[in-house]
Image: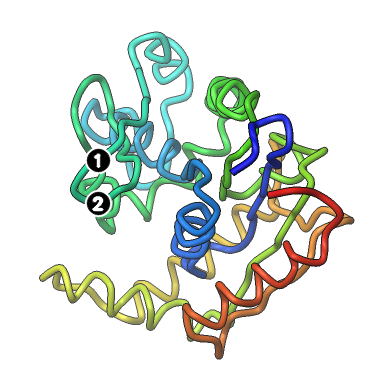
Amino acid sequence: MPDNTNKIIIAIDGHSSCGKSTVAKAIAQKLNYIFIDSGAMYRAVTLYCLRHNLINIGIVNIPELKANLDKIKVTFRFNDKTNHNDIWLNGENVEQEIRLLAVSQNVSPVAAVAEVRHLLVALQQEMGKSKGIVMDGRDIGTVVFPTAELKIFMTAQPDVRAQRRFDELTAKGERVSYDEIKANIIERDRYDETRDESPLRKANDAIVLDNSFMTREEQLEWVLSRIAGKEFEI
């Protein structure tokens, strides 16, 4: 592999539950890049809010959250067993807990708080200084890395995303409702696209990947083919 001066930043944005992290992890592994799950960072802050009663039925106590920001330390640590970076909150591995439905139901209003976004965007930009990273989220190609060499906007039909999320959670033993999950996905889309701070939108130079009827292997091949067509060294 070439040194980092020849590596790039790959920004993957898109709707919730469309497999952004899965694709980003696969790409990073294929290229020997670092994968950074920006969504996990917002989920970690949301978990902190839930644990400290800073959010109730989707309503964030913004003054209290702002007062607690200096107490929230979000980091990534490499997991030798999975070969991926796990998310840590104040010294605790919360990689599994942040995937629970309660976090999914509350992450959008937390992520809409300007001070939260400013804090995490600064951390993300610091992580990307050496390049050679794949980062997924909602505003990676528009706000965090607007000059990223490759931008992908992922989406899928709501029914497909809800079924994937339902299958994922039930496989973990959780008792969940498909209808509740679908309603949550639709609401998160609406919230993400209409929030005042860094709303979800496709960057003008992003390539759209609708993976409604694609396997993981087909998605990986699709992205790799786009990388191969670019004029840079990976």
Work out which residue is located at the far front of the displayed protein and give it.
1
Q: Is residue 198 left or right of residue 132?
A: right
Instruction: Please say if 192 is above or below 183.
Output: above
Name the residue beneath numbered marker 2. 82
Say which mark, if any, is on residue 124. Answer: none
Q: Quadrant of residue 122?
A: top right
Q: Is residue 39 left or right of residue 229?
A: left
Question: The disc labelled 1 sits on which kind of residue?
Answer: Asn
Q: Quadrant of residue 129?
A: top right
Instruction: Please say if 89 is above or below 163.
Output: above
Work out which residue is located at the far bottom of the displayed protein and give it.
213
Q: Nearer the viewer, residue 49 or 163?
A: 163
Give the percent coordinates (x, y) of residue 124: 57, 29
Whether the residues at callouts 2 and 1 have beta carbons within 8 Å, the answer is yes
Name the residue beneath numbered marker 1. 79
Question: The disc labelled 2 sits on which kind of residue?
Answer: Thr
Give the percent coordinates (x, y) of residue 87: 32, 36
